């Protein structure tokens, strides 16, 4: 597939080493279009960018091999490259201070201009946290908010699943080139997003999973949404970076509270202390954003037939707990507790955690 001249000019400039987004936008303001930048004299270019970059622009930018790779990638009808000049470019990002000059997209690009909400959190999510993220995301998607997240393990993946299950689908913003799926464990989810949602990246094809790129992609996650919901996060979580970006953009920041004993609640609690809005249901978010909600669906819970199992569930509460503690709370022996926990796990009401702990799932 041959690239049209305009898109080829955008790609040539975007692939020049040392020419960052800010400098490229400065050149666009000065010269008007990518082709006019490529046609400009070295002297004029050198006034705005380093001389080495100016020389590369005068030489025509990158080699044809990278352009050919992009051309082959675009042969797939699911794939698009959207530039700042395209009507399909997400308008929400134009309201941010650092919109990428072009975006690689795979899937339903019309979702990029839907009302959206970022849902992020820990990669090492608890079972309850993942269930919360999926439940929130599905309800918000059914209410018309496309769910934006980062395709990471844990909360991100759960949020995407919930968004895809709802009416407004989901957007994944990744920190690699779109010809790479990272993490590999989310390959099936990535394929589903490409078919039913959309995956986007500001990074060129072939860009590997570099640590520095993930905080950078977080600004796009926050920029696409009307707000940002943090479901679980430790104090050093990258999700707090996304929340900070959202706050700096004037977007709403929401947080789900958790156990005071859980490290995965510390980040959310810090956000709440800093002024984030505490939410217990999707309705809390919809009301804050002045959006209507559909009638909530009935919670999916198992049927408890053994009264001792109900007593154990009551004794477990909603914080992680070990068997010895449950024996004291319920006045039962350890073998009876173990049997009842197995029953509750089968019914989807309890999950086992590392370290011999168990947690109730609402």
Image (tube, rainbow, N blue to C red):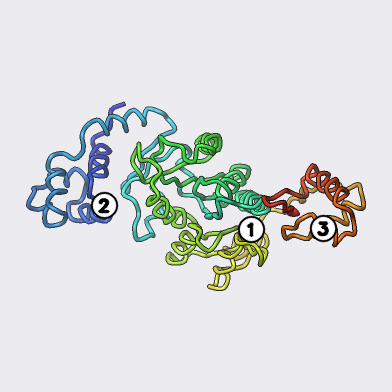
Which quarter of the figure has residue 12? top left
Find residue 38 and report its horizontal and vertical position in percent: 16, 43
Find residue 102 and report its horizontal and vertical position in percent: 33, 46
Task: Please state if 166 lies on the left or on the right of 211 as rendered.
Answer: right
According to the picture, the residue beneath numbered tag 3 turns out to be: 326
Find residue 275 and report its horizontal and vertical position in percent: 54, 72
Specify whether residue 126 is in view. Answer: yes
Q: Nearer the viewer, residue 127 or 216?
A: 127
According to the picture, the residue beneath numbered tag 2 turns out to be: 20
Q: Nearer the viewer, residue 236 or 333?
A: 333
Residue drawn at x 51%, y 53% is: 115
Which quarter of the figure has residue 196? top right
Eye-nearest disc, 1 or 3: 3
SS at mark 2? loop
Find residue 280 and report its horizontal and vertical position in percent: 67, 62
Q: Nearer the viewer, residue 329 or 345?
A: 329
Above or below: residue 277 compared with residue 52: below
Task: Please state if 21 lies on the left or on the right of 213 as rendered.
Answer: left
Residue drawn at x 45%, y 41% is: 109
């Amino acid at each position: 597939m041959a690239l049209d001249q305009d898109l080829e000019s955008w790609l040539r400039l975007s692939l020049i080493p040392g020419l960052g987004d800010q400098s490229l936008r400065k050149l666009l303001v000065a010269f008007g279009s990518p082709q006019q930048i490529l046609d400009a004299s070295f002297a004029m270019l050198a006034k705005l960018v380093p001389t080495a970059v100016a020389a590369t622009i005068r030489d025509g930018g990158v080699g044809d091999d990278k352009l050919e790779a992009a051309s082959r990638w675009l042969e797939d009808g699911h794939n698009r490259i959207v530039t700042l000049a395209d009507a399909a470019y997400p308008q929400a990002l134009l309201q941010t201070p650092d919109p990428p000059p072009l975006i690689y997209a795979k899937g339903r690009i019309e979702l990029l201009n839907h009302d959206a909400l970022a849902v992020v959190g820990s990669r090492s999510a608890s079972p309850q946290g993942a269930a919360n993220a999926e439940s929130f995301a599905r309800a918000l998607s059914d209410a018309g908010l496309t769910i934006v997240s980062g395709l990471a393990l844990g909360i991100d993946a759960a949020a995407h699943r919930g968004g895809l299950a709802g009416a407004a689908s989901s957007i994944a913003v990744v920190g690699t080139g779109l010809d790479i799926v990272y993490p590999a464990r989310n390959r099936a989810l990535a394929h589903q997003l490409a078919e039913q949602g959309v995956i986007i990246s500001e990074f060129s094809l072939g860009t590997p999973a570099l640590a520095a790129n993930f905080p950078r992609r977080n600004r796009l996650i926050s920029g696409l949404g009307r707000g940002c919901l943090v479901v679980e996060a430790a104090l050093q979580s990258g999700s707090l970076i996304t929340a900070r970006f959202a706050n700096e953009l004037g977007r709403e920041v929401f947080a789900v509270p958790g156990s005071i004993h859980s490290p995965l609640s510390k980040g959310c609690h810090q956000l709440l202390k800093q002024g984030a809005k505490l939410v217990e249901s999707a309705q809390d978010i919809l009301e804050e954003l002045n959006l209507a909600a559909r009638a909530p669906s009935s919670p999916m819970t198992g049927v408890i037939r053994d009264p001792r199992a109900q007593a154990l569930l009551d004794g477990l509460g909603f914080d992680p707990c070990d068997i010895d503690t449950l024996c004291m709370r319920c006045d039962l022996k350890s073998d009876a507790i173990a049997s009842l926990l197995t029953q509750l796990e089968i019914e989807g009401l309890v999950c086992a955690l590392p370290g011999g702990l168990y947690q109730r799932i609402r």
